[in-house]
Image (cartoon, rainbow, N blue to C red):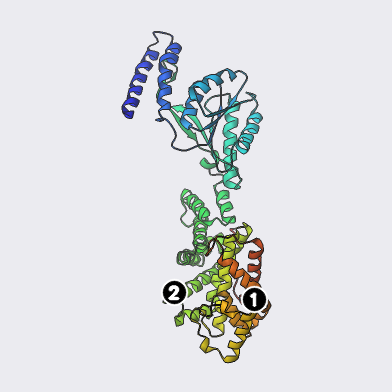
Amino acid sequence: MESAERLGIEERLKKAWREVEKGDRDARVVYQTKVWPLLLDLWKSGRKSLDAHFDLSVHTLGTSPEATILAILGIRAPKVVILHTDETEKYLEKIKKEADPKVLIPIRVEKAEVFDIYRHAKRIVTEEMDSKGRVAFDITSGTKAMTAGLAAAGFYIQALRELKDAVLPEIRVYYVDSERYSTEARRPVAGSERLVELISPFVALDELAEERARAAYKAFNFAKAAREFEELNQQAYEYEGDYRLYAQLSAAYARWLSFDFEGAQKKLSGLVQFLASPKAKAKDVKLRVHLDTLQKQLDQLNWILSLQSSCKQGRCAEDCFKQINDVKAVGGLLRTLEFLGGQAWEKQDLVMTALFYYRSLELVIQHLMARRGHNIHCFNEANLDQATREKFVELARKVFDDDPKQFDSGRYGLLGGLLFLAALDDPVVGSIAGKLKQLRALVEARNEAVLIHGYAMPSKSHVKSLKSFYHGLSKNVLTSIPRFSPVNLP
């Protein structure tokens, strides 16, 4: 029924348009009385509307209000801003009646003052919208200064958003175009009108593409950087150019930091192999300045993969125990968790910071236990001498207020591991042995956290103490393991 109704509108519109082209009567009168009502119905039906959703549309208004009305109907934003002049203010009532937007905000501007347009565009997107919104700028109608100014403002704001990560809404620029023009009627053929997006010169000319990719890389948004550099590489038609290598490096880091260590190793291995080749040396590839660092990072990935592979048969397996005892295998994973924890801390993401540092602290304790010949995952008290067991009970009483039964000795996690290391007089643990009771409080807070077993948010002081405990233990363990840090792009 609906499609039949639309078809009926289009057929009637064609018939009315033929009357305009004949010119038997005043074409303007025929257009306004017969063509325009049908054209309005066609656009109101949604057939000409954009698929994209917009929260706000901004329109420059000239002496052709019909084009602005069509743009409003095609964009379908609930809030509409009209930039009008003294001369075009009289069309606002027609727009309100025929486009019928939920909210209409008229703003008077100077028709020849482009700076006026810039000022209003900036105010509109910062005051009328939040940063997660989407805004359409329509430049179909208006003076040259008005339309050029609004388009330029839209392109500039969008470039700031993409390149500088500015907290601004997304901007798109449109105008109403027509597929056919009637020389007889001296106007676009009714029904052939459509909304067309104007592509930003920053995108079309790619002047900012490399800067955008580098900005994503610098912000550690490696997945985005990989996509941007890959697009640049395809445009440059250089399979072994810098862009391809930067895309490969970004993809390796993206996979590494999402714990896809195997995928990261494949990407980085291929990159290191190429950079070490005579071909790369002959071409003087810029990224070769980081070859040594990238080789060390590849070594870390290989250590992590060795740990993962050895522990596939179970954490009590002998090969797994050997890897946990190897500071290189454990160190590669610890440096990764350190980096992620540090990034989460900078963003004030307390939940993720706590998760990364708790796991890091747990892994250090597992390694220290392994160095003393004990696998924390399948610990057996019978392997301890009487004196050590007695010391453990003594420490447990202090930590658990003279009630060691509160501590489940059948499950040796972070706190249990530290108690046994203190009982074994481990020199690394000695520096924090006096803080075990404080650590107990941190463990309990961790168990109540929203991403563990409870519903609570970790406090900043809790997370800060957790970081301090970790660095206090790891500083004497990871001296030979370089910190993970993405290399700077040349």
Q: Is residue 314 left or right of residue 200?
A: left
- The residue tagged 2 is 309
Secondary structure type for disc 1: helix
Residue 486 seen from this side: no
Residue 397 seen from this side: yes
Question: Foreground: 222 or 411?
Answer: 411
Question: Foreground: 283 or 126?
Answer: 126
Residue found farthest to the top: 25
Q: Which badge, 1 or 2, is on the more N-terminal residue? A: 2
- For the N terminus, the image quarter is top left
- The residue tagged 1 is 436
Residue 123 falls in image quadrant: top right
Q: Mark 2 is on which residue type?
A: Ser
> Do the residues bearing badges 1 and 2 touch, measured as CB atoms within 8 Å?
no
Q: Nearer the viewer, mark 1 or mark 2?
A: 1
Residue at screen point 46% across, 55% down: 239
Question: Foreground: 448 or 372?
Answer: 448
Q: Is residue 273 left or right of residue 403?
A: left
- For the C terminus, the image quarter is bottom right
Question: Where residue 422 appears, x then y in whole percent?
Answer: 62, 82
Q: Mark 1 packing: few (<14 Cα in 10 Å), some, or many (20+)?
A: many
Question: Where residue 486 appears, x then y in whole percent?
Answer: 58, 62
Instruction: Decide: is 102 above or below 19.
Output: below
Question: Where residue 219 appears, x then y in whole percent?
Answer: 59, 55
Instruction: Decide: is 233 above or below 289.
Output: above
> Could you give the CA–CA distance between mark 1 and mark 2, rounded to whole angstroms?
33 Å
Q: Is residue 131 left or right of residue 251?
A: right
Q: Mark 2 packing: few (<14 Cα in 10 Å), some, or many (20+)?
A: few
Residue 185 falls in image quadrant: top left
Question: Where residue 116 appears, x then y in whole percent?
Answer: 65, 29
Secondary structure type for disc 2: helix
Q: Mark 1 is on which residue type?
A: Leu
